[in-house]
Image (cartoon, rainbow, N blue to C red):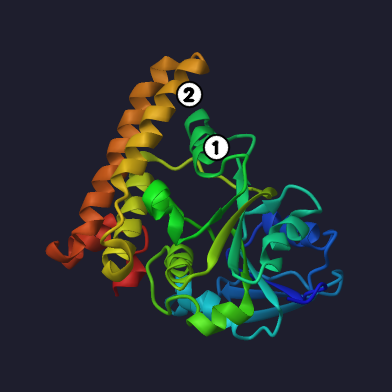
Amino acid sequence: MDTNPKIDVVIPVYRPGKEFHKLLDLLDRQTVPVRTVWIMHTEDGRELPSGESYGFRLMTEELLPEEYDHGGTRDRAVRKSDADIVICMTQDALPCDGTLVENLIRPLGKDQVAVSYARQMPRTECRLLERYTRSFNYPAASRLKSAADLEILGIKTYFCSNVCAAYNRQIYEKLGGFEKKTIFNEDMIYAAKCIREGYFVAYEADAKVIHSHNYTRREQFSRNFDLAVSQAEHPEIFQNVKSEKEGIRMVQKGIRFLIRNHTPWLIISLILDSAAKYTGYLLGKNYKRLPVCLVKSLSMNSRYWE
């Protein structure tokens, strides 16, 4: 790859607020400049920011709500770009500093690295259990993952997040890009495809964004339901890779974390949260056996089923 690669950013946007404007300001202050920001805007009557005050071009495409798809919408934007590297972000992820882009693209300098994803740091208002989840999924040490790690990491080998991830566009196009219709998890499905084709997925801990959610138990249930649906729809990738061991390890480490932080009473909440996630996951894996009306009510993305 070129030593001075062209870099574009893709951001699906719905009901943008002040945080989105802050994201654009922070992208404009990076040590490695962004060339174009592609905004895929699901129409909601709100006015988007003008590109006149930024050092990059701001390109916007309007979408109807029924046109939005986790994979298809991002793929549409990536294919509009002719950049060497395309970074996918969400509108609520904020770079921790001006070196986000510089650090995130560093692993893509190696020929066989197809994608690099960032570390997610908790917001100041983030609950303790969610802080633990962030640290579990996004540790302080970077890692390069390949098919050789499946025996050790299991499902985590394929883990990747489009909250902030950079893609080698040449490899992206060669492998067919994101799934064009997916309920969720397009980033992990693509990462799995890369690894199965002999490429590497990089987790870059020095590239940091602020991003977390204080989901309710019901929201955790629905999110894991959709996650499992995406896996059930791609048995060619996930049927021989188990997720349950990773969930058990997360609970075990979480209990130790809470004891060390002198909050043992939160163990009950951890167990209840984990039970909600696992129940949602089990139902999602078996969604084909459920009535469509029930599936819609359990899903976080009911429009997907219409």
Residue at figure coordinates x 37%, y 63% from the top left: 301
Looking at the rendered structure, the number of numbered marks drawn on it comes to: 2
Q: On the rendered structure, is 280 left or right of 288?
A: right
Residue type beneath disc 2: Phe
Q: Are marks 2 and 1 in contact (CB under 8 Å)?
A: yes
Q: Secondary structure at mark 2?
A: helix
**Mark 2 surroundings within 10 Å by alpha-carbon count, few (fewer than 14), some (14 through 19), many (20 or more):** some
- Location of the N terminus by quadrant is bottom right
Q: Secondary structure at mark 1?
A: helix
Residue 78 lies, in percent from the top left, at 60, 79
Give the label on residue 10, or none. Answer: none
Q: On the rendered structure, is 242 left or right of 16?
A: left
Q: Earlier in the sequence, mark 2 or mark 1?
A: 1
Q: Please, which residue is most extreme toward the top here? A: 262
- Location of the C terminus by quadrant is bottom left
Say which residue label 1 marks.
Answer: 135
Q: Is residue 273 visible?
A: yes
In the image, 80 versus 107, the foreground residue is: 107
The relative height of residue 304 versus residue 104 in the rendered view (above or below) is: below
Residue at figure coordinates x 71%, y 63% from the top left: 105
Residue 237 lies, in percent from the top left, at 33, 67
Q: On the rendered structure, is 272 left or right of 77?
A: left
Residue type beneath disc 1: Ser
Q: Is residue 163 visible?
A: no
Residue 7 lies, in percent from the top left, at 74, 73
Say which residue label 2 marks.
Answer: 257
Residue at figure coordinates x 59%, y 74% from the top left: 41
In three-dimensional space, the C-alpha distance between marks 2 and 1, rounded to whole angstroms, equals 10 Å
In the image, 26 versus 78, the foreground residue is: 78
